Amino acid sequence: MQKIIVFSLGFFSMAAQAIVFREFISTFDSGGLTVAIFLFSWLFWISLSSFVTSRIKSLQDFAAKLSPGIFLLYIPAFCLQFFLIFRFRKILGIASYAEIAPATVIICSLAMNFPLSMLTAIFFQSSATWLKTTSDFSSAAAHRFEALGSFAGGTVSSVLFFSGANSILLGIISSLFLSFSCATVYHGAKKRAAMILPAFLFVILIFRTDRQISDFLSREKWGRFLPAESFQEAFNTEQGGYLAGRYYGQAIFAKDSGICETVPDDESNLANLSIAFSQKPRPKNIIIAGGGLSLPLSFAATGKNCKIFSFPDDREYVLRAATFLKKERHKLPPNIEFPDNDIRNFISNPDNAGFDLIFINISGFASLQAGRFCSRQFFNLIKKSISADGILVIVLPSSENYLGDETAFIGASIHKTLSASFKHILIYQGESMAFAASNSKLSENVKEMENNIASISGSAILLPELMRNLYNAERGDFARLSFGKLEKKISIPLNTDEEPALFFPSLLIFSKKSSLNLSLLLKVFELRKFVFLLPLTICLALLVAIVSKLIRGNNSRYGFLRGVIMVFSAGFAGMTSAISLTILLQTALGSIYLYFGLVTSTFMFGVFAGNIFYVKLRNPFFKNTCVGPILLLSTNIILISFISFSAGNILSIFSFAFLFFAAGFLNGAIFVSAFEHAALEKNEEQARLASPFLCADNLGAASASILAGLLIIPVSGVGNALFSAIILIFANMLLLASAPIHKK
């Protein structure tokens, strides 16, 4: 029963973290840097708590003595964390419409991840101490069953979110499982008292009280933007929760972070429609990538005789929004289709060719879709799928009379990448920046553009005279001049699937909002191919320091220290591989938020499998010498090298699942290997080693989140991030080989 309780701990922690992550990205944004900050804060608190726990023996004994009842503190900690996310604007006095500064995002992330993460480390140590009566290597057993529980929690979370369940339901189910598991170990009056909480949660679950709670929270969120009485319903998709209502005759759709869109919204889409139809007044087949529902509706209202294929950022949201409109007797036009297929697969099909207009709507620089929609490989696919005189239009945020380094960078990179696939490129510079690209001649005469728009019969939306404001040759030259000035400072790379250069502008924006020096960051980017020298220098310095210490004969704690460093490097390499695979998966298959739970659970299942694989090994030469750890580290280098050299060519979800599993497998095996060897050499009670090794593992992962996620990948690319992990592992191998492991 002890192992089931540890399993339930892993289940609850992963389910709770999935809920918190989902709410976090809905409240803030879903950019790559924000996700990296979230991961760092989550892992940072676990490593800090592990360190504190390892230093205070009385805390270990106290937590173990109160196990498993103390594990129920997870539930109020989760409720507190959920409350902090829900109320953070009110707590900090930030208006609902105000933009959140990067420093505030970091502080909020640290505060919101504090409760669960701090308890995770304490509970891991108490689990290891608690299990030592039933397992020779209790830390390895605690690690194994918690990883298996995390796999189950991530899988159940994905299934529930995929089915449209709300976060409250998942919270109740995971709390019920944890509380019931803990209650089963007690007897008599204690058991009856312990069963009160699971009985209460079971009643709530049976009567689906989660719906009333979720509805109450949804109305509270809606009231931040619009009058509460205009709220009508809430719905959930795989990617997040949405709110819907009507206000002054318009359908309004919102998320925690603000209003997503209004329908109809022809006025906001007028500029986009004008740019597209000024070059192609009568397209027969249109593809729209990005955005939501209002843009394809506006296109359908203008081009009534064309067929529109729309690939929104969240397809399930668009379908649910369309259902909401049907309730109001607003049916979708018959010429709009939302294919249940990724846009890359769709246009790669030879049967889906001959498109006259492909329109890409990029919502912001922080969007992970920007790199995916503007890569050289994607442009080549578009080039093959459009008709002989077809055009591609890309629209992204900008400012009319000023281009900052971040806007100039993304514009220059897109322009340079477009030039590799298309002969003719036109720049529309205004409140938005737009690119029109084609291999046939584009119209550059404003009068001709106005005539093209005027020739569209039956359109009550478009205004031909608006083109005088939208297109100005001098503004286009101004944009090209800004691109050229930036090109003199740094070499602007092409944006590709394997090296997405468009992650860098999000770092520029983050730094600009933080009042940091962008010139210094641009200089760092110019040296991006050599950024890996930083981790190389650190690794070599550590290696020299440790070897020097050994030469002086002070090797009493060598085995323990070597194991800690080994686990740290495994944590760093595992998280770097996971982040890199996540970015590659986003590029190849679309939104990572569709697969976040499955990706996490697959990695954790690999941790479980690697753990049990190493525990079951019986070869003493492999387990009692440095051969075993070196072979594991060598295999990790091979895996990371494969990911690096195959970047851009990994295209199936099964391939990604295998690689996530393999990364987790090696992480789990290395953790147990380091722990066992440290326990043999240090000759200490094995359960006491749980906290320092958990600290090292999570500190390595946290370091990877901040270094690889926030610096190396945006600046230097996925390849160099993976190379930095290889350097760290190689230094660790040298350290292992410097003194053979031996059993005392």
Image (cartoon, rainbow, N blue to C red):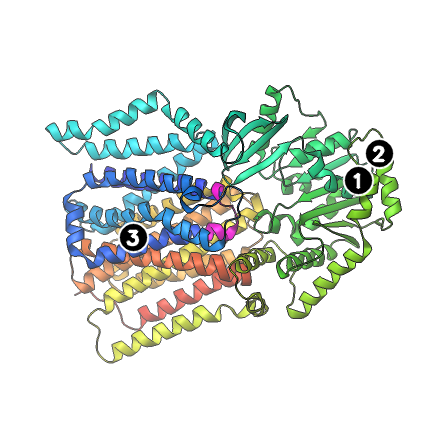
Residue found 33% across the figure and 21% down from its top: 206
**Is residue 96 inside the magenta stretch?**
no
Query: Which residue position holds label 1?
Result: 277
Overall secondary structure of the magenta section:
helix
Q: Is residue 562 left or right of residue 282?
A: left
**Residues at circles 1 and 3 in contact by the CB criterion of under 8 Å:** no
**Is residue 31 inside the magenta stretch?**
yes
Q: Secondary structure at mark 3?
A: helix
What is the magenta range? Answer: 26-36
Tag of residue 456: 2
Q: Given the current orientation, which residue lies at the most extreme left position?
A: 188
Relative depth, front residue between 491 and 299: 299
Q: Is residue 265 left or right of residue 66?
A: right
In space, the residues marked 2 and 3 are separated at their CA atoms by 70 Å
Q: Position of residue 433 (x, y in %)?
A: 70, 51
In space, the residues marked 1 and 3 are separated at their CA atoms by 63 Å
Q: Position of residue 734 (x, y in %)?
A: 35, 71
What is the three-letter code of the residue carrying label 3? Tyr
**For mark 2, does the 10 Å Cα neighbourhood hold few (<14), some (14 to 19), or many (20 or more) residues?**
some
Res. 418 image quadrant = bottom right
What is the three-letter code of the residue carrying label 2? Ile
**For mark 1, does the 10 Å Cα neighbourhood hold few (<14), some (14 to 19), or many (20 or more) residues?**
many
Q: Quadrant of the C terminus?
A: bottom left
Say which label, 2 or 3, has the lower sequence index.
Answer: 2
